[in-house]
């Protein structure tokens, strides 16, 4: 298993599209530490923002408040990503398979345009869960998103298939322009 621990809460968002089991599973420890991430508009190496432990694996665990870390699990097709704490925007966007678990809260656009896999949020979630990005005609087409707490605006906007379960309250426009699938509140 690969374990990443956020060194400190950043003042600006971190864009970390490389933090996916698909990418990390085949890399050596040194290659993982050298992966590019963006702190605002500056490109840095992963090791500058995270403590990196473990060797290549399809299991990735992130510790710390990653509420400002965007794109975790982007395009994931396999493996397991666990966030012990909060997760930022675009968690599991374009996901095709595998599992993402977050023990805390997650921000907007969870599972946006996903086509498979499972995302489980232990706390509250932002808006646009499983939704289509602006300008896109279709949101989620398969997979499951489970939110233990409440959710924000436009849950399931333009979704075509798949399942979204929100155990708490959801804000306005849930299912907006929905074409199919299931939303359970």
Image (spheres, grey):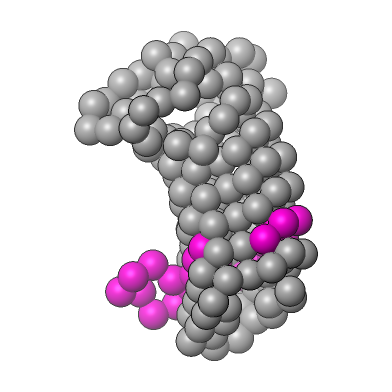
Q: Which region is colored magenta?
A: 127-150
* Quarter residue 114 falls in: bottom right
Q: Quadrant of the C terminus?
A: bottom right
- Residue lying at 30% horizontally and 74% vertically, measured from the top left: 135
The percent position of residue 20, horizontal first and vertical second, equals 53, 38
Kindly tell me whether residue 80 is visible in this rendering.
Answer: no
- The stretch drawn in magenta includes residue 141: yes
Q: Where is residue 43 drawn, in percent x and y?
A: 26, 26
The image shows residue 57 at horizontal and vertical percentages of 64, 27
- Camera-nearest residue between 12 and 158: 12
Compared with residue 41, is residue 100 higher up or lower down, i.e. above or below?
A: below
* Residue 177 part of the magenta-drawn span: no
Residue 12 shows in the view: yes
Which residue is drawn at the image coordinates 31% and 21% (left, top)?
44
Q: How many marks?
A: 0
In the depicted view, which residue is nearer to us: 105 or 178?
Answer: 105
């Amino acid at each position: 298993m690969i374990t990443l621990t956020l060194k400190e809460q950043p003042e600006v968002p971190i864009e970390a599209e490389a933090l996916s089991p698909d990418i990390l599973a085949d890399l050596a420890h040194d290659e993982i530490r050298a992966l590019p991430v963006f702190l605002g508009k500056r490109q840095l190496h992963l090791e500058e923002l995270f403590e990196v432990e473990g060797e290549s694996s399809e299991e990735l665990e992130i510790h710390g408040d990653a509420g400002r870390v965007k794109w975790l699990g982007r395009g994931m097709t396999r493996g397991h990503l666990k966030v012990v704490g909060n997760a930022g925007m675009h968690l599991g966007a374009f996901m095709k398979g595998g599992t993402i678990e977050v023990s805390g809260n997650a921000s907007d656009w969870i599972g946006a345009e996903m086509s498979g896999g499972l995302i489980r949020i232990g706390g509250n979630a932002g808006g646009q869960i499983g939704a289509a990005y602006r300008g896109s005609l279709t949101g989620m087409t398969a997979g499951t998103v489970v939110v233990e707490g409440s959710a924000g605006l436009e849950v399931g906007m333009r979704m075509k298939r798949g399942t979204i379960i929100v155990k708490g309250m959801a804000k306005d426009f849930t299912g907006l322009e929905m074409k199919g699938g299931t939303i359970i509140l």
